Image (cartoon, coloured by chain):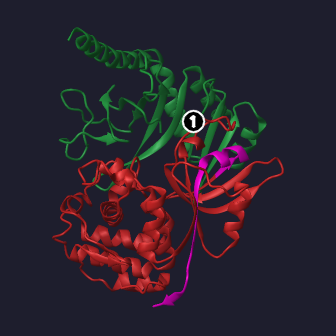
Amino acid sequence: MYATDTIYTSSHNDAVKYINSIKGLHKSSFWPNINPELFLKNIRDDINTPLDLYQGSNTNFCGYAALSYLPLNYDPLGHALKLVTLFEKGEVQYGEELLKPSAAVRKAAGNLKYKGGLDIRPAEQMWFLSLADHFKSYLNFFNKNYDPGDENKFWAAVSYGKFNRMIKKLFGYHVHARGSDLMHPKVGDIYTYLQEQLKKDGITIVFQNNAYLRKKNTGKLKPGFPTHFIVLLDIKKYENDLIDILYWDYGFRTLRQVNPAILKKIVFGISFISKKNSVHD
Amino acid sequence: MIKLILILFMVVLVSSCATTSMTKYYTEHHEELEIIEQSYKENYTHKPFAIEFNDKGYKNIFLELLTDSIKYIYEFEVNEPRLQDTLKKFNLSPTPIKNLITRMQSIECKGVSMLDYYLGGKKNTLVFLSVKTKDFRWPLTPQKYYILTYYTQPQYYDAQGRLLDGQTRKRLRELNGDVFKRVNARVAYTISEHFR
């Protein structure tokens, strides 16, 4: 079990060595619809190209995908070990949490269809479903137990508070959170604040209203709520005031140009995630 | 009781109107739609991209351009020179893209994109076209879109014309959580809240 003030880290090579050492992973009675070969391939792909991890089309898995950026980039070995244990034993101690998914979730993993690339990524299906099954917030109050199709519904929804809590409990990182589900963060100029976060040693995750990004860039927008988590990679302002934001949006890095008014409207939460102490395996 | 029957009648009428409008739209514009599909597919082979109008007047677009490592999303007014410059920068020929945009404007087609779907673990693609509906909408209900999906091969449908999973032919295939219906062997439609 993790010490409360310790964060484990490992290298890409450690993870590759481990995954290559697994010979003949057997079918798990806990996960009847997961093909072991596809499962291992998915873990190997995530280790080699962590940015390819995909939340699936039309699901509410974006929060779980966003937080996966941390172990995939900073502790791929630890994460792979945990996923293999969860697969083989049907439960795993991950950080402070014992993940023990329900039978309905175990039956669904590997069987999610029509979600684009997620269809052929059973390890991600297992991981996202297990997190959604374990962590609850007020958004999940009326739909706490999984039924087929719930991956697209409030059962899987992630509030800002739940998102930050998951990172602390699973990975032991320090989270400095500004903002909420309803109100914009009071941090002064959003562009300047985000730029300052990116200069620090850590990861910046933004909770935003994605629908705004698909509206005309006028700044005259109706009120709305945040629905999407992105990992901010870079931000740059040009002389004409337009801002380029580069972010990881699961499966892709995306570069989107916005004006300052849009940026102010879309951002509801900014989480700066940093390590306290690190231990190398 | 009479009020309840009237409300039910209205609901049935409105949903039936939506399907009729879709059929009417497709009948009127199917030739243009096919040209858009073919032109999009042809240009897509040079550089993966997607177009989406983001205003009521069909004058502004989001242009998505996919490279190996980054998806770029730019917003343009369709006649501004910046659009042409960007297309050239990404190795797309401006004239056919401009023609594609003009055709989309002419039939108020909101967006065109390529969508991945998997059958038996194998990746396939289809062309996804969306059109904003003009049907009656109850207050506080979401905007709906006609969605037309163009497959490269003929698809399987059940007796009610619903699109089936090509592998099992027993399960209804869904895209974005929606069930699709037959337009012809290669084209299926739905009416959805999701336009991409």
Any part of residue A108 in sight: yes
Give the quarter of the figure containing the C terminus of chain A.
bottom left
Magenta region: A256-281
Per the image, the residue denoted by label 1 is B52
Any part of residue B91 in sight: no
User: Which tint was used for chain A?
Assistant: red
Name the subunit of mark 1: B
Q: Is B184 in front, or is B5? A: B5
Q: What residue do we see at 48% from left, 86% from top?
A: A6
The reply, left or right, for residue A63 in relation to residue B171 is right
Q: Name the outermost residue toward the left.
A: A29
Q: Is residue A32 above or below residue B78?
A: below
Residue A263 counted in the magenta span? yes
Q: Name the outermost residue toward the top.
A: B2
Q: Residue A45: percent from the left, percent from the top?
A: 42, 70
Q: Residue B73: percent from the left, percent from the top?
A: 62, 47
Q: What residue do we see at 25% from left, 56% from top?
A: A111
Q: Residues within 10 Å of mark 1 (few under 14, many from 20)?
A: many
Q: Which chain is drawn using green?
A: B
Q: Is B172 in front, or is A30? A: A30
Q: Is residue B63 above or below residue A248?
A: above
Q: Is residue A186 above or below residue B41?
A: below
The reply, left or right, for residue B70 in relation to residue A160 is right
The reply, left or right, for residue A149 in relation to residue A237 is left
Q: Residue A35: percent from the left, percent from the top?
A: 24, 66
Residue A190 counted in the magenta span? no
Q: Residue B173: percent from the left, percent from the top?
A: 28, 41
